[in-house]
Image (cartoon, helix red, strand yellow):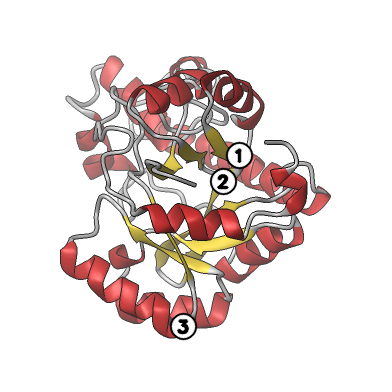
Amino acid sequence: MGHVSIDLHLHSTMSDGTLSPHELVVEAADRGVSLLAITDHDTTAALPEAGEAARAAGVVLVPGVELDAESEDYDIHILGYFFNPRHPALEAALKELRETRERRNAAILARLESLGVGVDPERVKAIAGRGFPAGRPHIAAAMVEAGHVASRQQAFRRYLARGRTAFVARTRLGPDNACAVIRAAGGLAVLAHPAKMGLRRAAHQVAVSGVDGIEVFHCDHDEKDVADLLDFARERGLMITGGSDSHGPHSERPLAIGSVPVPDWVGEELMARAPEWWKAQL
């Protein structure tokens, strides 16, 4: 592939990022990233616009998604790559995830109203913009605008975080189901930022979910995490990926696209597993 700069974990305004798909691709190209994936939460809506921008910018866009799954009492995120975004099983799963998110939003807003800190549902949708559906970060922003809290962090600490008065659990896919959906659509399933859950839990999830790979290089992984995860992946024959998890320059954690160094061999190994139908489009 020659020299590449790689970022396989990025978010656009189609979920909780602050750059549009087009802006994200242009920014990535400007920063020297030549192999990227937009992995929005529970949606592939960014792909058409991002695909056009990638062709214009001369960079390679891998089809990506991040499915929000849940196991026991902790969240698990499964990244998908190289899937067919129009596969019926994937489309049905994403539709159900969007609908459960919308039902959850309605329940959260009702709880906030009962607590005397209500916000306008239409304002929440406006804050979310094209990204759909809205989520807790958008509700938190509306709470700041309404003067109920001083910051989005305070909104979560007081009301929206797990265990707080306005928290509502959301029905999610199990990690094994998330992997199955990605595989059914011809894709590769990768366990996102495993150091966040610890190696013991990560090892359990790898065993029960049957992921194809793990995300080794990530903004929350220090040098020891990377070394441990590399050993872990190689012992089990897992694909290795990495990315910044950037949500754009105007997010609460404005990490730059391409800010996490990902070795070129990661991109080479990933591209070696790309399906022929996808390569034919390049």
Left-right relation of 249 to 11: left
> Is the residue under label 2 in contact with that under label 1 (CB below 8 Å)?
yes
Which is nearer the N-term, disc 3 or disc 1? 1
Instruction: Write down the residue under mark 1.
Output: 43
| Residue with the most extreme right position | 88
Of tags 2 and 3, which is closer to the observer? 3
Q: Which mark is residue 65?
A: 2
**C-alpha span from label 2 to label 3:** 24 Å
Q: Position of residue 61 (x, y in %)?
A: 56, 36
| Residue with the most extreme front position | 2
Instruction: Write down the residue under mark 3.
Output: 236
Query: What amino acid is found at the position of numbered circle 2 in the picture?
Result: Val
Work out whether residue 81 or residue 264 is closer to the camera in this orientation and state it.
264
Left-right relation of 282 to 250: right
Give above or below for 248 relative to 90: above
Q: Position of residue 207 (x, y in %)?
A: 51, 83
Query: What amino acid is found at the position of numbered circle 1 in the picture?
Result: Thr
**C-alpha span from label 3 to label 1:** 29 Å
